[in-house]
Image (cartoon, rainbow, N blue to C red):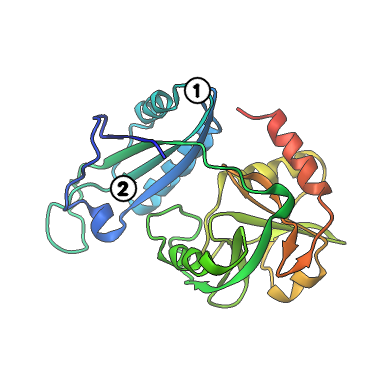
Amino acid sequence: MTTTTRINGHATDQVASSDRGLMYGDGLFETITCVAARPRWLALHLQRLRRGCERLQLPFADFEALGAEIQTMANGPGRCIVKLILTRGPARQRGYRPDGNETPTRILTRHEWPAAVAASDFRVGISGVRLGMNPLLAGLKHLNRLEQVMAQTAMRTAPLEETLMLASAGQVIGGSMSNVFFANDSGLFTPALDDCGVAGVMRQLVCEAAAAAGSAVQVRAVDPGELPRVHEAFVTNVRWGVQSITALEGRALSRRSHAQELRRLIDASAS
């Protein structure tokens, strides 16, 4: 896969060994889909990044210039993925504590569009890897992703496209690289992310589209014992969009009406 990299505006692929993103996972990232040289939902990505910087007290403020850099990386025909990593920057002293005068590092990479998954055979299971609960970091797309790495590693021998992860307390949180939605006789619902998990841009778009269509999504704790009674489920991220699950823990799911309608509404309003 061809990759183009720019670090702090320069064409290089090298960062300082003292960078706090490398040393401690002290930073955030965004994955942005681009179509015909247009970054999709860029404003939402930058809004989430700004909120993350505020919560981590990461001293970065030039979001307008960053948006322009992302646009430059997106230029070109067809589709691509632009990934942004924003770290606190090189450490100025030893130890976990930042001194408050670090200069953030921004890393932008452009990737070819990945091969499509089989929409007609999208199987999902439940991972044995659980997510630690930490409300201080819940919702953030921070750089600490070892739990997801372990969940994906465990999938190497499983005939699955995605795996759902539970919190250490046992409730369903989402996929290893996606958010998840379910439908039963009471309507649509998605896990609350108060204790862990990533609040995805596509998750936000789905909730907004459903509310606009008069079928609001219930955000709540989801017990795994509920899953045998759902009749539709789908996962979301900015690459997959709204992806119907065809089999959940080996049980076929044939209904896809919510996913189809939400996909149509989001595509119609894409910006």
In 3D space, how far apart are the residues under numbered discs 2 and 1 (Cα atoms)? 29 Å
Is residue 11 or residue 266 the one in the foreground? 11
Amino acid marked by disc 2 = Leu
Which quarter of the rendered picture does the N terminus lie within?
A: top left
Whether residue 80 can be seen here: yes
At a point 82% along the width and 43% down the height, the residue shown is: 214
Instruction: Examine the rendered structure and indicate whether residue 32 appears above or below residue 146.
Output: above
Is residue 14 left or right of 219 when viewed as pictured? Answer: left
Residue 79, compared with residue 84, is above or below; it is above
Residue 120 shown left or right of residue 38 in the figure: right
Residue pointed to by mark 1: 37
Residue 211 visible within the image: no
Q: Is residue 162 left or right of residue 15?
A: right
Assign a secondary structure to mark 1.
Answer: loop
Q: Position of residue 40 (x, y in %)?
A: 55, 31
- The percent coordinates of residue 56 (x first, y second) are 35, 53
User: What is the x, y in percent for residue 259?
Assistant: 76, 47
Residue under the point 62% across and 70% down: 126
Give the secondary structure at mark 2.
loop
Relative height, residue 38 to residue 20 (above, below): above
Q: Amino acid at mark 1?
A: Ala
First reached walking from the N terminus: tag 2 or tag 1: 1
Q: Residues within 10 Å of mark 2 (few under 14, many from 20)?
A: many
Where is mark 2, residue-wise?
Answer: 58
Image depth: mark 2 or mark 1 in front? 1
